[in-house]
Image: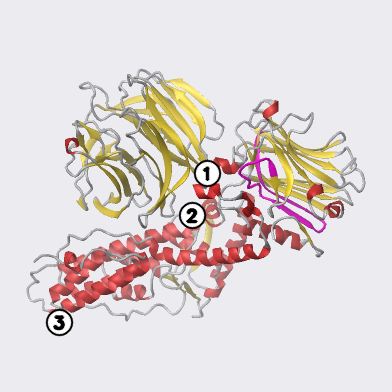
Amino acid sequence: MKGCFSRSIDHGFFNYILAICFALLFTETWGNGLRIKGNAYPINDRSAAAISFGQIKGLESFNKGTFQLSFNLALDEKSNQGGIFKLNFVNSEQAISMNLRSIRGDKIEFSLNLEGSSSLGHLVFDKSQLKIQQWFSVNLHIDLSRKKLLWKVLDQSIVLSEITGLKANAGPRQLIFGKNGYAIDVADYTIKDIYLSGGDVHCSIPLKERQGDIIHDSRGNAIGKVLNPNWMTTESFFWEKWKTIKLKSIGGYQIDQRGGRLIVFSQDSLRTIDLYSGKESVHPMPHNLPLRIQLGNSFLHDNKLYIYEVNNLPQDSCSIVRIDLDNPQLVCVSKKQLPMQLHHHTGQLLSQKDYLIFGGFGNERYNGNFLKLNIQNGTWDTLSVKGDKIHPRYFTSSFLDSSDHLYIFGGMGNPQGDNNLGRSYYYDLYQFDVNQQSIKKIWQLQWEERNKIPVRQLVYDGKRNFYSLMYSEYESSSSLQLYQFSLNKPTYQPLGDSIPIRSDKIKTNANLFQFEPLNRFYAVTEVYDNEEVRSEITIYRLRLPVLTASDWNSEQESKRISFLPWIIGCVILILGGLYWKWKRKIGNKAVLTPLSSYQIPIDRPANKPHSAELLLTNDFLFPSVNCIHLFGDFQVIDAKGVDITHLFKGKIKHLLILLLLHNPQKGIKSELLSSLLWPEKEHGAAKNIRGVTLNHLRKSLEYLNGIKLVYAQSYYKIELDGTYIDSYHFKSIMESNSISNELWTILSRGQFLSKESADGLDMLKSQMEQDICDFLMRQIQHAIVINELRMALQLIHFLYETDPTSTEALKIEINIWKRIGDMAKAKKAYQKFQKRYHKWMEVNYSISFESLLDQD
């Protein structure tokens, strides 16, 4: 289907649809593209990619009617001027070429020329519109018979009613990217997804090769050749050694996500590296740094760099400094120290004033405490935590999610925290609820490789996966390997190639960062000289999505495809996606919670017989008009009592749900709406689709009274004046910390957004589900305290709807039946849970019935 083929068809609109189908059906699961080496390289190393139309079946139709060229372009950090492409014509010396140059420092100008004859036009952009390594589209449409032209770059275009000087009946014969003969002035850029059409010929060239110098169309036909190729897929498997910085003293590093830069510091210097351009700037450390850097611990907050040491400093010397990066100023925040050194701890910034660390090694001890730093006054506090026990360790790693849950993975230590008793390697995952100060063990991994430890931080993708670099620290010449782990279950897989690291000093460290605007991972290593007085920092980068070894080693011959396998493949992907979404509804919650230490009360309140126990009833009636349901099946009832759910489909429905779930007072910013609903679209296209979808939503809401869509100060929001929204009422019940028959009726409709799943909704849905579980658990425990055991059982039933594999709920349920005196029902509840657990988790439930029973 996708490729170069000829067919007699009345084209026009069909060609447009065909191009869209190409993009939808054959997008690669990993990055494709070809990097053109330009003026930043010696002439002999510059790239030239030539596509010969003579190798395309049906070439003769390229000379008829219209010819269209489109491709995606991304400028590299070294792009400033030079040629982009050259389109040569049949039996003619004429050619159309596209070039770029920087003008006035902050502008980029693209020019289109009929070489040797005339300029066809210029398009000028602010550099902020065309960020380095960001994809944008280029389109060229030529009416060959009437010599008309349309040229479009991003959202600007030029239309020419006549191409002055173009010879009659000219037809394209060759397309060249990069250098060409004497034309050696070449820009540095990357291209992908070339699409050619003319007459009855359509040709798609994804540039997904991994090696060699042959260009293939999407059917595997060889149609061109590259000189000095640099295929993008290599950048999704092999780490690029990007920067090496040799410091005269011990230093450290940190990523500035907001500023798009890496910060490298030492005792006497402060260096920034622009992630877009690669440009470095070095400044002396403001004033004399009053802190003697030993381990280079740091974090960033509000564009201020905090450097800290926890131990082994002279008495009354500075232990935490703050450096304002906007206007370099240095402040000593604290002189307080901890009682022991903490090599290889992990830390995360929690809020405006707190920084939390865990783990570490010093004084022959492993740390198992959570230590919180108040960054305003520089004081440390040891948190009192509850829940599962996490053993003291170091070489541990972490990430913080949007719900203030700190996830801690791996490390090395022992239960006693005493290094003299030996050490064990851990491959486990814990969740620390910062607000509740409680720990839950998520899973224990069966590690099948040689022992490794993770680097300082984990990277979370927001889709229930996290990533870590791991290495064997006990080997002097070791290597860092990237791994992907699942939050839901103890599974992992290695990704990409490895990075060498010299690991013969305890201070040796590494870290992993992700910078989403460039879709890259960054790995940073810091190694020390023999005296441990100087350090060397090396920065590597890798393009996402990252290939596995099996991806990389798969045969190139798989490029040859036919219509049927791809159609079948697409159907399988769609069905698989639906199945995945269905599984994901509960997958996000399929994590074992720790056994509750909550005990069923033995002493019943005075004058409180069983018969007096309260029961919730399903006798609350929803309004018959002007009603929107988000629990269970999505449903909308209009002002006449008619079900108009059919008016809210696809993006219109998701748009309404997003608006309802975001801050009802403030709303949601227009740009955020676009990025959530149409992440794959360019800014201009997304804006147009957004406008159309908002108009459809506005018209559909007119069937209800008491609800309208408003726009103010770049924010869209829903204003309510009488329309019933079940999720809003449920939140009111939660905020009142009470229960009612209305709660029963709402929950009886089913799981929250039970059939809805989309990139923009999943995080909000997951947060709501977590709020529901937390609320129900509080009410369950309250019902037990006041001895309303039957009500507690009802609430447990609803909790299972949202979290069907909750061990904590099971433990409470069977102990309620034990307290009531019905062990048969307790065992029946356990057996039912076993079946449900196996259904969702696809493994047997391993905790015994007896171990869940409270000891009298």
Mark closer to the observer (3, 1): 1
Residue at image position (77%, 33%) is: 180
Magenta residues (range):
188-214
Whole-percent x, y for residue 93 in the image: 88, 37
| Badge 3 amino acid | Ser
Q: Indicate which disc residue 611 carries.
A: 3
Which quadrant is home to the C terminus?
A: bottom left
Q: Image point 16% across, 42% down: which residue?
A: 416
Label number found at residue 519: 1
Task: Indicate the amino acid at tag 2.
Answer: Ile
Q: Secondary structure at mark 2?
A: strand
The first of marks 2 and 1 along the sequence is: 1
Nearer the observer, 731 or 760: 760
Rounded to the nearest angstrom, the CA distance separating label 3 from label 1 is 62 Å
Q: Where is residue 39? Give x, y as percent.
A: 68, 28
- Residue at point 19%, 32% (across, down): 364
SS of the residue under disc 3: helix
Rendered view: 10 above or below 184: below
